[in-house]
Amino acid sequence: MTASDETASEVDRAGEPLALSATRSNSTDPRSHPMTRSRWRKQLRPALLSVPLLSIVTGLIFPIALAVPARLFFPGQSRGSLIVRDGEVVGSRLIGQSSKRPGDFHPRPSAAGGGYDALASGGTNLGPANPKLRDGASDDPATPTVDESFAGVRQLASEFRLENGLPTTFPVPIDAVTRSGSGLDPHISVANATLQIARVARERKLSQERVRRLVQEYTFGPQLGFLGSARVSVLELNLALDDLALAVSSPSPASP
Amino acid sequence: MGFNLAWLHPFWALGLPIALSFPIGWSMFRSLDPAPDRVGRGLDALPMFLCRLLGRRKPAEMDWKRYALAFLAFNMALFVLTFGLLYAQQYLPLNPDGKGSLGALGYKDAAGVDHPGADTGVVFNTICSFVTNTNLQHYSGEQHLSYFSQMGGIVWLQFVTPAAGLAVMLAVIRGLRGDKTMGDFYVDLMRILVFVFLPLCVILALVLVANGMPMTFEGAVKASPLDGAAAKMDTQTICRGPVAALAAVKQIGTNGGGFFGPNSAHPYENPSVWSNLIEITEIVVLPMASLVMLGLMLKNRAHAAVIYGAMLAFLVVGVVLAVHYEVQPSAATENLAVVQGPNMEGKEVRAGAISGATWAAMTTATSNGSVNSMHDSLNPIAGMVAMSNLMLNVVFSGIGAGFLNMLMYIIVAVFLAGLMVGRTPEYLGKKVEAKEVKLAMMAILLHPLLILAGAGLFAATDWGAKTTANPGPHGFSEILYEFSSACANNGSGFEGLGDNTPAWNVATGFVLLMGRFPPILLPLALAGCLATKKLVPQTAGTLKTDNLTFFGMLVGTVLLVGALSFMPALVLGPVADHLMAMKP
């Protein structure tokens, strides 16, 4: 049987008028004859043809048809919202970065690789009742190549207090002691940023008021006043602080 | 702080898709089930043209067996071709970062020994997972797949598998209303793609790009971080790619498989508060809209409203419970000098705990499975809500598949109600007899059987016990969740589980297939049975399926049959986890 024969028989069958709301007769269905080889072929042919057809439509035409307007209308966003300084990519507005410099605002702790490793994004996946999450874990000396040490909530909280000169019972903001789901969270809460202002101002020899204004400038949300909560973009804020330092050290210093 | 508007998030997240489901459902009804004289006319010429490329001039008239066969043959073809693609991605184009075959991924066994390049299981699992519209991922997209595989393998399966599920739903509805034919699988498939998925995805993807989602074929970028010493990295390698193309269809097609490992928790896959709201709306809007379409197609809106209402009731209760428990402080911060606020472990600041819990409930209710927070780190009862949704598997669930699952419960509810009043049960004017009830019970019992037997086996042996990341009941929860997610074709996970081992890959691959095909084919057979039956005239004694009594009957049946079978397992997992964390 050739392909055209099959098509012809298909048309014959399909040629019957479609009576969608007609009442059914009680006679046995004439199409329930036993399976034959030609029927198998009739099933396989559209199945095999539809795979390349649909993969071209949805897997090739669709992404390309999308990439073109995305590139034209949203050139920055479509390429990852990258931040470029002096021709060099320093990061992305959306991807957090580790920073331990005392003069910087510090992001949340991260479970992505050694911290904010965008190749190893992920969370801790520890259950709330897991003692490791609360108390941490120390490095296993039996495996010198792998570092099993893990800072728990207790340790992260006391480190945060020490770093920012807070009294020992001061309650630390929750986002400063928990790791995000992606490990790349670019934001911290406003409460978290506020507690870091004194340290940053001291290290950078700026007035607290100046730093506070900059923090406000990089505080986003809640969108339209009701969506999400207020948050501070850490990398952008640190870059702005660096720019400020450059402006201050340049020959014509800006007014403080 | 007082009243905070962030609390209203569940309200938007539920209100927006409900509002959108009506116009979308109406347009689905108009475009997917055209009157006979409008077939091939106007816009309908486009899907007909695609069918002509497959060698079809006019829609074939399939009975349920031929429809099922077409569905299976199509899935078989998907399976074989995608297997080849993922295995050979290193020889194919669009691979700027030089990724190798997925089959060479390798795994680490229970004793911690690495087996590089020895795991074909992960390819099998991945294909099973994407062909069944599940998107369980035992690999990490940005690390292991080329752009060609992401587009040609993942994205296109994310288009066609929900379309195939919706096509079967169309066929079942035609059977239920007593049509002479159940339609043509390929015509349905093309119409769904052309009229539902492609237009919605183009619009949504562009909106997502505007919100900051990357859509590029350029490779990863190397950035010079401000403080390289802090992370012991001189450069930060930032993976990107055609994310928006995948993310739009991932959300709208109840797929859930992310471009990046952490899914919509990754800032590129969910860049802003707006994208978060759009994506959460996408999760549930089409399953809702398909029920609106059901009411219009059956010309029985009240019955569709009962189903919609029952599902919505479960969803609202789930969301409220999950949010309530997730804003409680986590056990990890108890008695420490830390703000006793919401559980932020595994959550992003821009999304927050309320949205995380809402998302968790909605993504598991539907068979979506994308996440914007790590479910493993949810507070135990919030995690239990997610797990219960997977176990019930009828709260909107997959596009098309959700109604098919609920149909089985409707048949059982009708049967139980019939027994109570001593009448032959009827559904939509057709007598429900032993054969139909048997088919329905088979579909319903298969779900707990696969989940409980699988979880029991893996919890008792090294296959599962050695792969958990958390001790005690939470470890058991990880195993239970993985099987529930696989069987419900959801795809989310308690991701701490070391699930890329041959045992997990093969077992969940099998459960995925069993969780997809029987629950789709049994309703199709049932509709085929009902279609051939004579209409029974309605009398005063006919049990109505479109009123509040039946709503109660349906909810009760789902709770009794569905929930009770899982109660003991839930007590051993999340409930024990919750109680143990409460210090006396």
Image (cartoon, helix red, strand yellow):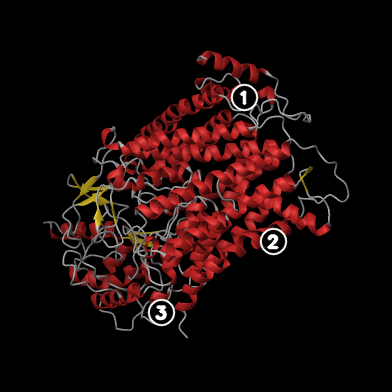
How far is the residue under mark 2 from the one under mark 1? Answer: 40 Å
Of tags 3 and 2, the one toward the viewer is: 2
The disc labelled 3 sits on which kind of residue?
A: Glu
Q: Secondary structure at mark 2?
A: helix
Q: Is residue A26 left or right of residue A178?
A: right
The disc labelled 2 sits on which kind of residue?
A: Gly
Dot 1 corresponds to which residue? B60
Identify the chain of the residue marked 1, using the numbered disc in the image: B
Q: Is residue B347 visible?
A: no
Across and down, in percent, residue B335 comes to: 39, 82
Cβ atoms at labels 3 and 1 below 8 Å apart: no
Dot 2 corresponds to which residue? B556
Q: Is residue B486 visible?
A: yes
Q: Secondary structure at mark 3?
A: loop
Picture quadrant of residue B468 = bottom left
Cβ atoms at labels 2 and 1 below 8 Å apart: no
Across and down, in percent, residue A117 comes to: 25, 56
Q: Is residue B153 left or right of residue B74?
A: left
How far is the residue under mark 3 from the one under mark 1? Answer: 64 Å
Across and down, in percent, residue A32 comes to: 66, 28
> Dot 2: few (<14), some (14–19), or many (≥20) neighbours within 10 Å?
some
The structure residue drawn at horizontal position 66% and vertical position 63%, both measured from the top left corner, is B560
